[in-house]
Every structure is written in structure tokens, then in C-alpha cells.
Image: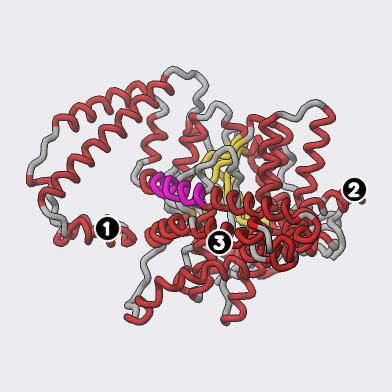
């Protein structure tokens, strides 16, 4: 494939910086073992220590984020949003609730027999049945303890709500949430009607007023069947949402085929419609959504609340972690491991807001979209590219606000074992192809530096992105062979204490991450939906051992696709946008 339109000779040089760094690190154990044996040995040890740090912090963040998601799912975000209209009145109401709860004392009426409570069973989510069965078997003294803990939890929650509302009541810049609008743009190509239909069904369940939500189904002219699917959905949901539009993007010569070009066209169309309808672009938020992203019911209420209370609301992205578990039980066991790695990374990264970049499905103001001239029609990684273009224009104001709710999505599928394996490989390679946009980051850093406009925050965010791309493409290979190769290729190093201990030290550091790995397994079990139907005893016995395949899955479905993308970019073998197969 030819270079993207507008690619200069300088671009073709700069874009190779990251692939060169990746290959230097991966091959360091070989050539470094000959030329720089001591440096190579210490580098590998430090690299392993850094891996231990990353793995441990990922596990910790994963736990914290999981707990925050659990807590956020219990909050009525629409009610919180409505409280911003008159914070003082809500504070008085909450103070009464707080006084009432403080007076509550334990009595047997609080011990509910969950086993026979049909009313409760109807309201409880089936994914929480495991927890209910455990609670039901608890003795009375533990029910008493549960009551005290729940009372303490409610008191703590109400106090924090009162404190936050008191702060909001003192501010004069809070917009009225009733003036807000959301527009969900779904760019799609060959996705089946059933996939799109399911996405729309979830959207229709939003707690935020549906009549202030619009939808733009963005099809591609090259696939006429997609436009017909959009028209069919438009007729089915007409009158439910405020507006439902269907666009048909015609790929031009100065664009590259992909989601970003379609989003560029669709978002400009939405902007024109918003202007025609007299909407305020500072109170209208656009959502870039994958076709299979199932938005939780409180998604827009949560975002609206965070938007209203944020002083820099116009420069923020809003992102909830993507959980690839909607079709988890349809995948072969080794690809369930890949989905688990992807989910772990997605959920854990919500905690580090200083590093958080939106991925796949995200929301931000139309004002900001217009400020950066919408999506880049020549980008492969539209999410990261959009964020960084906003970052370099508005600098320290730009960041991502985490939304602690699960956006359920499908992992890549296929009709045969070979097809689903291939699709998952190609999906990871497409994600890794985001390195092709690193040239923009590198060039923008130097431009800002020469102009005297580079802030420490922007430099930190840019460096972290580049480091993440390099680390993600090298970690599997360095961990697998890094500690063993230098002593093999250099007999002199092998006869030194450092050389002899290098494989042992590397292996020990990797084993230290097993505890984090075990915790990750447990929490992912709680995140996964229950498997329908009965499972044979043999499969139940084998299931825990599937996790032993994780290192192999990481190599073949993460490290190798990443290296594939880097190699292609290094030799200017450009990739076209690959559409993930959904069923």
C-alpha cells in the first residue's frame, strides 16, 4: 500500500524512529552480548524490574478500578445529575437521610432470606448470583456484621455526597444539564444487522432523557448493504431518539480507508445539523462508538454529571473501559486468554488519569471536535490521534475523565477455528499499527519545543505514549529470551558471575508477578458474564489450567502482531484499515 496522502519524506523518516528502537531492544541480547556484554546484562535486569513494576501496578490498578466500577454501578447517576440544579436543597435532603441511617440499629428484620426472596431475585443481575448464594449461607452474626458494614458504607457515601454538593453550590459556572445533548456516531462497514440492532437496544435504555440523544449511523458508500441496514434501523427507532441520521461516506483520494475518515465525514455532518437546529456546541457532546459497543444504562447520565462539575469540561474526553466479554464463551479457550489480557489492560488503565487515553468508544464536546477540525481522515489510530491533536493545541487543559462503568463489547470472531484465530491476530496488529501516528507526536514535540510552547505536561504525555508503544512491542521477546541469549552468544560473559546469574535473576523477577497474575484471574472471573447451560466436569477441571497458556497467548497474539506492525512500518509496507469481524 502507498504512503497515506500528504505523507512527506520527513514523515517517512520520523515514523521509523519507534520501529528502529523496537528492533534495537529485541536484538540487543544478541549483538549486545558480543559488543556490550555488561551493559546488555544490566539493561535486561532493569528491563525485567520495569516489567515487574508495570505488572504489579497493573494488578493493583485493576483491583482499584474493579472496586470503583462495582461502586459506580450502585449509584443513581441521573439522580446525582439532577441534584446539580439545586445543590442546597439536595444537601438538606441528604442530611435528613444521614441522620436517619445513623439512628438505625440491628434487628432480625435486616436478615433477609435471599434464597426465598423472589422480589429481590427479579431485581438482581444474574452476574451477581454467585455473591448471593454465598451471602445466603452466612450465619446470623455475619449478617449482623454485614449490616454494620453496610451502615458504615452508606454513612460514608452520604457524607461524601454532601461535601461534594456543598462545593458545587458555591460555584456559579455550572451549566444546566437539561440544555445538554448527546450524539452517538456509529461508523460501520460490514457489521450484520443483528450487531447494530443490539447496540441500539442498549442505547434506548439510557437513564439520561432519550429525547436529548441523537444517533448518526455512518455507513460507507463502498458497501451499499451497510446503508440499507442504517435505513432499516432509522425506521425502527424513528421517534424514540431526538434525531436519527444515516450518512454515506464516499472515500476520496486524499483519505485513507478506515474509521477515522468515516468519523471525519459523519462528525462534520452532525456539526452542520447541530448548527441548523440551533444547538450549543459547548453543551453538545459527540460519542465515537464501535458498532458493537453496548453502552451501560447510566453511561450518559454519568458523563453528563462529570461534564457539569468539571471547570475545564470543554477540553475533556470521557471514557469507560471496554470489556471484551460480550461473546467470551463463544471463543476457543486460548483466545479467551487474549480477551482477558485486553480487558485487564483496559480496566486497569482507568486509574492513571495522567496517562489515560481514550480507546475505541469515547465522548467529548462538539466544541472541542470543531477546535481540532474533527477527526483526521488520514489516521489509522483515530482515538489516540484525536486525543493528541487536542493535547498539542490546548495543552494542559486536555485529559481523559474516567467513567467507571463497563462498556461490553465483542472480541473478534470467525466461522472456523482458523478464521477466529486469524481475526484476533489481525485485530491486535491493527491496534499496534497505531505506531504509524507516532510521527505526529514526535514532530509536534519538536515544533512546540522550538516555539517555546512545550509544557512539561505535554512532554510527559507524549513520552509516555511513545514508551508504551516501544514497551508493548518488545516486552514479550525480552522476557522470553532476553536473560538466556547473552551468556549463550558470549562465552566470556557466561563465565562471569553476572553472566551466570542473569538467567536466574530474570526468571526470579518474572515469577514475582505470579501473585498479581492470580489476583487478575479472580477479578476477571467476576467480570465475566455467567456461562449459559451446564458445563461438564472435565471442562470445569481443565478450566483453571487454561491460564497456564497466558505466556504463549501473549507471544503469539500480542508480541508477534506488534512486531509485524513495526516491521511493516520500518520497510514502508503500509497497512490498510482492517475491519474486525463481528457476528
Residue 415 placed where, x, y %? 57, 80
Residue 507 shows which numbered tag? Answer: 3
Mark in the foreground, 1 or 3: 3
Q: Nearer the viewer, residue 583 or 445?
A: 445
Residue 347 placed where, x, y %? 49, 51
As displayed, is residue 570 above or below residue 71? below
As displayed, is residue 12 above or below residue 165? below
Q: Residue at horizontal 77%, vertical 27%?
A: 453
Q: Is residue 242 visible?
A: no
Q: Residue at horizontal 51%, vertical 71%?
A: 549
Looking at the magenta stretch, what is its main secondary structure? helix
Residue 281 placed where, x, y %? 63, 35
| Label located before the other in sequence (2 or 1) | 2
| Label located before the other in sequence (1 or 3) | 1
Q: Secondary structure at mark 3?
A: helix
Q: Quadrant of the N terminus?
A: bottom right
Mark in the foreground, 3 or 2: 3
Q: Nearer the viewer, residue 347 or 548?
A: 548
Asked if marks 1 and 3 touch (Cβ < 8 Å), the reply is no
Magenta range: 56-69
| Label located before the other in sequence (3 or 2) | 2
Alpha-carbon span between mark 1 and mark 3: 37 Å
Alpha-carbon span between mark 3 and mark 2: 42 Å
Give the labeled residue for mark 2: 10
Give the labeled residue for mark 1: 131
Asked if marks 2 and 1 touch (Cβ < 8 Å), the reply is no
Relative horizontal placement of residue 120, taking residue 287 as reference (left or right): left
Alpha-carbon span between mark 2 and mark 1: 58 Å
Asked if marks 3 and 2 touch (Cβ < 8 Å), the reply is no
Q: Is residue 96 visible?
A: yes
Q: Nearer the viewer, residue 481 or 360?
A: 481
Amino acid at each position: 500500500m502507498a504512503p497515506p496522502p500528504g505523507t512527506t519524506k520527513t514523515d517517512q523518516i520520523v515514523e521509523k524512529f519507534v520501529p528502529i528502537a523496537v528492533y534495537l531492544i529485541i536484538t540487543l541480547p544478541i549483538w549486545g552480548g558480543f559488543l556490550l556484554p555488561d551493559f546488555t546484562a544490566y539493561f535486561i535486569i532493569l528491563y525485567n524490574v520495569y516489567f515487574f513494576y508495570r505488572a504489579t501496578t497493573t494488578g493493583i490498578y485493576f483491583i482499584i478500578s474493579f472496586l470503583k466500577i462495582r461502586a459506580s454501578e450502585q449509584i443513581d447517576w441521573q439522580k446525582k445529575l439532577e441534584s446539580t440544579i439545586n445543590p442546597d436543597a439536595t444537601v438538606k435532603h441528604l442530611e435528613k437521610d444521614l441522620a436517619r441511617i445513623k439512628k438505625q440499629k440491628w434487628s432480625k428484620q435486616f436478615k433477609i432470606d435471599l434464597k426465598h426472596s423472589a422480589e429481590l431475585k427479579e431485581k438482581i443481575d444474574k452476574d451477581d448470583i454467585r455473591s448471593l448464594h454465598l451471602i445466603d449461607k452466612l450465619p446470623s452474626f455475619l449478617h449482623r456484621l454485614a449490616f454494620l458494614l453496610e451502615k458504615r458504607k452508606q454513612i460514608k457515601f452520604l457524607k461524601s455526597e454532601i461535601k461534594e454538593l456543598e462545593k458545587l453550590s458555591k460555584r456559579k459556572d455550572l451549566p444546566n444539564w437539561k440544555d445538554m445533548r448527546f450524539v452517538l456516531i456509529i461508523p460501520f462497514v460490514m457489521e450484520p444487522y443483528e450487531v447494530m440492532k443490539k447496540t441500539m437496544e442498549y442505547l434506548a435504555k439510557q437513564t439520561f432523557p432519550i429525547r436529548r440523544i441523537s444517533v448518526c449511523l455512518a455507513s460507507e458508500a463502498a458497501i451499499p448493504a451497510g446503508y440499507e441496514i442504517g435505513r432499516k434501523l432509522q425506521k425502527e427507532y424513528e421517534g424514540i431518539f431526538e434525531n436519527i441520521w444515516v450518512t454515506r461516506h464516499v472515500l476520496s483520494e486524499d483519505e485513507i480507508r478506515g474509521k477515522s475518515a468515516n468519523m471525519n465525514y459523519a462528525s462534520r455532518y452532525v456539526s452542520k445539523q447541530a448548527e441548523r437546529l440551533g444547538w450549543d456546541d459547548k453543551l453538545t457532546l459527540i460519542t465515537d462508538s464501535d458498532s458493537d459497543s453496548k453502552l451501560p444504562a447510566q453511561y450518559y447520565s454519568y458523563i453528563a454529571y462529570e461534564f457539569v462539575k468539571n471547570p475545564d469540561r470543554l477540553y475533556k474526553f470521557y471514557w469507560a473501559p471496554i470489556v471484551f466479554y460480550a461473546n467470551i464463551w463463544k471463543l476457543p479457550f486460548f483466545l479467551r486468554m487474549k480477551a482477558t489480557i485486553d480487558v485487564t489492560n483496559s480496566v486497569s488503565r482507568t486509574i492513571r488519569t495522567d496517562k489515560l487515553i481514550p480507546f475505541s468508544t469515547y465522548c467529548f464536546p462538539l466544541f472541542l471536535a470543531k477546535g481540532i477540525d474533527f477527526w483526521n481522515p488520514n489516521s489509522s489510530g483515530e482515538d489516540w490521534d484525536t486525543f493528541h491533536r487536542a493535547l498539542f493545541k490546548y495543552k494542559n487543559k486536555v485529559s481523559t475523565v474516567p467513567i467507571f462503568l463497563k462498556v461490553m463489547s465483542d472480541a473478534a470472531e470467525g466461522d472456523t477455528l482458523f478464521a477466529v484465530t486469524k481475526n484476533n491476530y489481525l485485530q491486535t496488529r491493527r491496534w499496534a499499527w497505531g505506531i504509524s501516528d507516532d510521527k505526529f507526536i514526535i514532530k509536534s514535540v519538536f515544533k512546540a519545543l522550538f516555539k517555546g510552547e512545550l509544557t512539561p505536561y505535554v512532554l510527559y504525555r507524549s513520552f509516555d505514549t511513545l514508551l508504551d508503544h516501544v514497551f508493548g512491542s518488545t516486552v514479550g521477546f525480552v522476557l522470553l529470551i532476553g536473560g538466556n541469549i547473552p551468556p549463550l552468544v558470549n562465552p566470556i560473559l557466561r563465565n562471569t558471575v553476572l553472566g551466570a546469574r542473569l538467567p536466574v535473576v530474570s526468571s526470579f523477577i518474572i515469577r514475582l508477578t505470579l501473585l498479581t497474575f492470580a489476583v487478575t484471574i479472580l477479578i476477571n472471573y467476576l467480570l465475566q458474564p455467567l456461562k449459559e447451560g451446564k458445563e461438564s466436569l472435565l471442562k470445569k477441571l481443565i478450566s483453571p489450567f487454561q491460564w497456564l497458556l497466558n505466556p504463549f497467548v501473549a507471544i503469539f497474539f500480542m508480541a508477534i502482531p506488534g512486531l509485524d506492525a513495526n516491521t511493516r512500518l520500518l520497510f514502508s509496507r503500509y497497512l490498510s484499515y482492517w475491519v474486525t469481524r463481528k457476528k
